[in-house]
């Protein structure tokens, strides 16, 4: 069993990240597995050194140890940045290019798609233009089947986004491609993520099938309900009011956070740290968070 924490350094981590981290750590320890820290830093426009530092600061604050991955910023920069794995992403892209009809070049900008009235699902504007896959100024999209309904951990998921981007104009992989390549590379077997990532999970399953991957198609997913504030809005890194950094500076303790997580999981024992939650929470209680089991009711935050 191997799971991973895969934060993006595009903002200060918020309470929703902490919830996923704690559940992932507890599940990995409960199953006697290995936990990997994998920081997804391909988005260089939004990556900042203080956001990277924030990841390590919060993992230390929460007391979540890992068996694999960088232990600090210096080690991350030296060996673990996704830039170090660019050859893997390029190899996956070249593999997809060899499969007839799988990819097509797209010259549509976000502005053009918004002006055309496209909402969510790509309208297929460039699908049949026959642009060269190496045409300058274009991105590459994966030609998704019209009936892209697949089984994710026993639950049927249909991706509503249509043909999705796998290679960007800047010559770097999309999140969908990089994430599935990394999970396969590190032989991940269990992934905990929010309900809002069910569609990316479907896209990544399709990619893994096309690439002939071994591990990713067998991953056990736990898509937990989203956390929401008092107004029912999900948390975002663009809203720093409930960032872990702001909570720490405001005097909220890690113990208070663990008490809240324990209550959310239905644990009645007194919990104030990671080990106490591990002792009080079994695998079945953790897996019951999966929205395919309990529905998509959001989890309100009340510290």
Image (cartoon, rainbow, N blue to C red):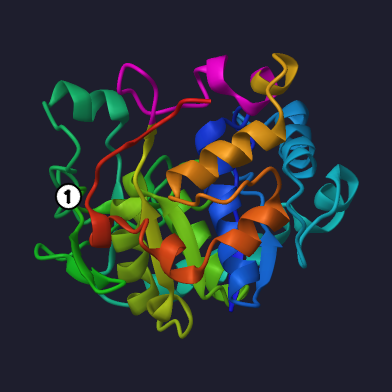
| Above-or-below relation of 231 to 180 | above
Which residue is pictured at 62% across the width and 54% down the height? Answer: 277
Residue marked by disc 1? 160
Which residue is pictured at 45% across the width and 61% down the height? Answer: 286
On the question of residue 236 being in view, the answer is: yes
Viewer-proximal residue among 123 and 39: 39
Q: Is residue 7 left or right of residue 110?
A: right
Which residue is pictured at 65% across the width and 78% down the height? Answer: 32
Q: Is residue 76 left or right of residue 251?
A: right
- Which part of the image, by quadrant, shows the N terminus? bottom right
Decide whether residue 236 is among the magenta residues: yes
Which residue is pictured at 71% across the width and 28% down the height? Answer: 253
Viewer-proximal residue among 298 and 281: 281
Residue 238 spot, x, y in % from top left = 50, 20
Mark 1 crowd level (few <14, some 14–19, many ≥20, 10 Å Cα): some
Residue 271 spot, x, y in % from top left = 64, 46
- Residue 221: name its quadrant: bottom left
Residue furthest to the front in view is: 269
Residue 66 spot, x, y in % from top left = 75, 61
Decide whether residue 2 is among the magenta residues: no
Q: Is residue 293 left or right of residue 67?
A: left
- Residue 142: name its quadrant: bottom left
| Circle 1: element type | loop
Which region of the structure is painted magenta?
Answer: 228-246
Residue 234 spot, x, y in % from top left = 37, 28
């Amino acid at each position: 069993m191997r799971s991973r924490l895969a934060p993006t350094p595009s903002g200060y981590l918020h309470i929703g990240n902490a919830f996923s981290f704690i559940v992932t750590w507890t599940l990995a320890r409960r199953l006697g597995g290995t936990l990997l820290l994998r920081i997804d830093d391909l988005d260089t426009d939004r990556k900042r050194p203080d956001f990277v530092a924030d990841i390590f600061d919060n993992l230390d604050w929460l007391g979540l140890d890992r068996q694999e991955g960088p232990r600090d910023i210096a080690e991350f920069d030296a060996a673990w940045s996704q830039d170090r794995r660019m050859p893997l992403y390029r190899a996956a892209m070249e593999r997809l290019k060899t499969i007839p009809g799988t990819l097509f070049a797209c010259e549509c900008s976000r502005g053009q798609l918004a002006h055309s009235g496209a909402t969510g699902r790509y309208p297929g504007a460039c699908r049949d233009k026959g642009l060269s896959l190496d045409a300058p100024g274009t991105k590459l999209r994966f030609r998704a089947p019209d009936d892209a309904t697949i089984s994710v951990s026993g639950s049927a998921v249909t991706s509503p986004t249509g043909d999705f981007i796998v290679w960007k104009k800047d010559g770097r992989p999309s999140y969908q491609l990089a994430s599935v390549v990394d999970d396969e590379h590190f032989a991940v077997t269990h992934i905990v993520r929010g309900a809002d990532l069910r569609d990316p999970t479907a896209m990544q399953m399709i990619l893994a099938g096309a690439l002939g991957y071994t591990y990713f198609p067998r991953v056990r997913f736990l898509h937990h309900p989203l956390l929401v504030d008092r107004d029912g809005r999900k948390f975002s890194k663009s809203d720093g009011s409930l960032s872990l950094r702001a909570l720490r500076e405001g005097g909220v303790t890690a113990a208070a956070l663990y008490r809240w997580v324990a209550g959310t999981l239905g644990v009645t024992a007194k919990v104030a740290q990671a080990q106490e939650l591990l002792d009080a929470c079994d695998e079945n209680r953790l897996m019951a968070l999966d929205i395919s089991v309990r529905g998509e009711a959001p989890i309100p935050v009340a510290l």
